Amino acid sequence: MPKKVKCFIICPRLLDENMKLVIGGLEKYIADLGGLLAGAGYEVVVCQHSRENFTAGFRGFTVAGVKSGGKVGGLLDWIGRNTDEGGGGANYLEDILIFATDIIITPSRFKRVISIDHGVAWDDAVFGKAPALVNYAQALKCALRAIVKTRRYSYSNNLVCVDYNFINWYRTQVKTISQNFHCIPNYSEIPSSKPKKDSCNISVVFARRLVSYRGTRLFADAAANILRKYPGLSVTVAGTGPDEGYMRGRLGEFPNVTFTSYSAEDSVNFHSKYHIAVIPTIKHEAISLSLLEAMAAGCAVIATNIGGITNAIIDGYNGLMISPVQSELEEAMERLITSRELRDKLSDNAYQTVKEGFSFAKWSEKWLKVIDEVRRS
């Protein structure tokens, strides 16, 4: 591989003011991608928005904070001002530009451009009744959004998505797809063997950012009823966010409910302590990293049939798949609480599914293949 080939990744924000990784799935993904490409011999520069200009080394690659006014064009201008062939910088014909998320795609001078889509995040429908005009207006809004997105995708000649749900959506919106399309499903680190669980006390974990669309209220309301029926059950809520107050209000009365948090790098180890993991998303979800990490940790998983989650869960084989409805969640929780045989079956198959289909090693192999194809194009 020619040493002069570089990968520039534009990411809204990767490091905070203390040069620590920002907490979030996108940031973890880009940190892992930057480390992977740097380890493969590419010179990697992640450009991010910042209040003040800075340059820092991180996991073998460079992070450049740019006082850009929050504009992606400002980051591209920085690349143009600070890199040229004489200074060992960007070669717009040979080097690779990667947009960390599709919402920031913008025209550039680079010939080789990759954009990453992290899943459909505009699936706003929820169960309920509304006047017909509300649904008609929503259909029009989605059509206009598709036009905007399709135009934005045209600025990139390579699209990477993290699940097949996105590909299927895009096929319904356009007549032809001119970009090179690559599906690289999300991933998890895999323990060398499935973690063993305490056979005495059954434990349930909800480990998500505490925002309503992640199913915080659905889980809290269902868990409150289940705890009254099974007072020996242990429940842990791991995360922070604006819905923490609601969850504490619904579950704070129970002595066996714990609120905590954990670092993204420790997710698999954290999940390994629990028998059951609940992923009750009501909208806006790709193949969730937390879902795959829970499966890798040998949890029996309950997940809703939203977005990319459906690419990973086979109902009754490696998890329980439900609609985002409280009665279904309570029924699924009760099934797992009362059946060790079912818990063990789902746990074994969940671990094996991630090991074979969603490992970090497999993700890495696919990304390096895409980068090599783009470099040779």
Image (tube, rainbow, N blue to C red):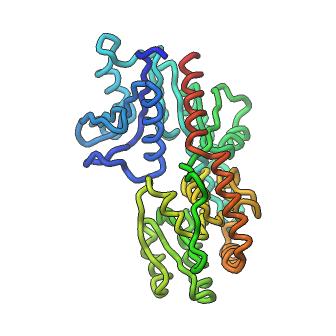
Residue closer to the observer: 283 or 349: 349
Q: Is residue 137 visible?
A: no
Q: Residue at x 44, y 18 (%)?
A: 5
Q: Quadrant of residue 328?
A: bottom right
Q: Is residue 272 visible?
A: yes
| Image x and y of residue 137, in percent | 65, 54
Q: Quadrant of residue 69?
A: top left
Name, please, the residue furthest toward the top. 86
Q: Residue at x 31, y 48 (%)?
A: 20
- Is 183 situated left or right of 235 in this image? right
Name, please, the residue furthest toward the right. 316
Residue closer to the observer: 68 or 219: 219
Say if 336 sits above or below 59 in the image: below
Say if 245 sits above or below 36 in the image: below
Residue closer to the observer: 179 or 356: 356
Q: Residue at x 70, y 73 (%)?
A: 332
| Image x and y of residue 354, in percent | 64, 51
| Image x and y of residue 45, in percent | 37, 30
Say if 234 sits above or below 351 in the image: below
